[in-house]
């Protein structure tokens, strides 16, 4: 009873044909070299023919064994390729996934305390390791204090307003009266989610107070702009509100 053959495997068959092609190509090159050598040595040619006939008889008598050997070689080669593919797949799976960009934060939706914590977090992220929230009753306008990477004292006032409520000049004047004289700021910053009125911006420019509205805050938060203290090279110590 004949042994039942397994299912047809395209990859194994392709591998087998490729292996046979390599063997035939190598054998053809060897025969060509032997034929050229035999042209110069007739006795060697006769010996070569005899050896070829003997080899053919052996192959014919042992074709089953030769078939098993060929299958073994093909399986081994196929196994090496499968192992290589498995290693490549494992390396690809172990490769870390690219980090996704953080979703933009809607600071206007935070409560006032969470907003102050978020601003302090931005300061810490960008090098102010000691940034902390100090706002509360009697804070005299300072909600966040920190030391910049170049050693300056940063004092921040946080205004979590809606889009229709902008920080006005009176609020800036109150902060300007304490940020330098009381809190000894080298750099004063006001962050407002509602933006600023024109008089407030004029006053802030006179007193060297940085003003960050929603656009500036978003750019800082998302990495589209440098931290505020990078924009001011010289310390603003000693300045006071007019």
Image (cartoon, grey):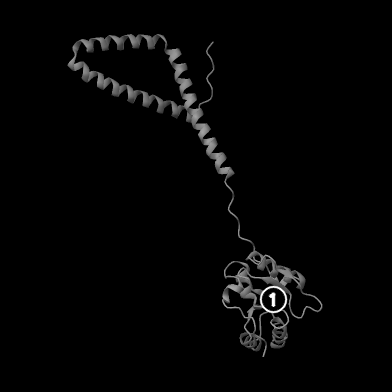
Q: Position of residue 233 (x, y in %)?
A: 56, 76
Instruction: Write the residue at 55% across / 35% down.
Output: 86
Tell me where residue 197 sits by quadrant.
bottom right
Instruction: Write the residue at 57% across / 46% down.
Output: 95
Q: Where is residue 24 in the image (x, y as percent from the top left)?
A: 34, 23
Instruction: Write the residue at 53% across / 15% down.
Output: 3
Please, which residue is most extreme toward the right here? 137
For the C terminus, which image quadrant?
A: bottom right
Residue 196 in sight: yes
Tell me where residue 221 sits by quadrant.
bottom right
Please, which residue is most extreme toward the left here? 40
Give the camera-side residue of 28 and 104: 104
Q: Position of residue 216 (x, y in %)?
A: 61, 75
- Considering only vertical position in the picture, is 171 above or below 35? below
Tell me where residue 223 sits by quadrant.
bottom right
Tag 1: Cα neighbours inside 10 Å, few (<14), some, or many (≥20)? Answer: many
- Considering only vertical position in the picture, is 20 above or below 208? above
Please, which residue is most extreme toward the bottom here? 242
Residue 9 in sight: no
Asked which secondary structure carries label 1, the reply is: strand
- Considering only vertical position in the picture, is 52 above or below 8? above
Q: Give the left or right position of residue 203, taking residue 143 as reference.
A: left
Instruction: Write the residue at 81% across / 79% down.
Output: 138
Q: What residue would you read off at disc 1?
A: 156
Q: Give the left or right position of residue 237, taking residue 72 as reference.
A: right
- Considering only vertical position in the picture, is 115 above or below 84? below
Q: Position of residue 29 (x, y in %)?
A: 29, 24
């Amino acid at each position: 009873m004949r042994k039942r053959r397994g299912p047809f495997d395209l990859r194994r068959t392709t591998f087998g044909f490729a292996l046979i092609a390599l063997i035939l190509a190598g054998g053809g090159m060897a025969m060509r070299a032997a034929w050229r050598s035999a042209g110069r040595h007739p006795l060697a040619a006769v010996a070569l023919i005899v050896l070829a006939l003997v080899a053919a008889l052996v192959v014919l008598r042992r074709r089953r064994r030769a078939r098993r050997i060929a299958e073994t070689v093909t399986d081994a080669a196929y196994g090496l390729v499968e192992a290589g593919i498995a290693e490549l797949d494992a390396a690809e799976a172990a490769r870390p996934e690219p980090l996704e960009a953080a979703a933009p934060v809607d600071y206007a939706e935070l409560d006032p305390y969470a907003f102050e914590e978020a601003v302090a977090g931005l300061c810490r992220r960008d090098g102010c390791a000691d940034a902390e929230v100090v706002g509360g009753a009697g804070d005299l306008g300072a909600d966040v204090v920190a030391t910049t990477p170049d050693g300056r004292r940063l004092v921040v006032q946080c205004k979590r307003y809606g889009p229709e409520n902008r920080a006005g000049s009176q609020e800036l004047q109150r902060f300007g009266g304490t940020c330098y004289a009381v809190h000894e700021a080298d750099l004063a910053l006001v962050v407002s989610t509602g933006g600023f009125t024109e008089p407030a911006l004029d006053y802030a420019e006179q007193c060297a107070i940085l003003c960050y509205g929603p656009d500036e805050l978003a750019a800082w938060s998302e990495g589209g702009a440098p931290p505020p203290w990078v924009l001011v090279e010289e310390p603003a110590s000693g300045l006071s509100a007019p």
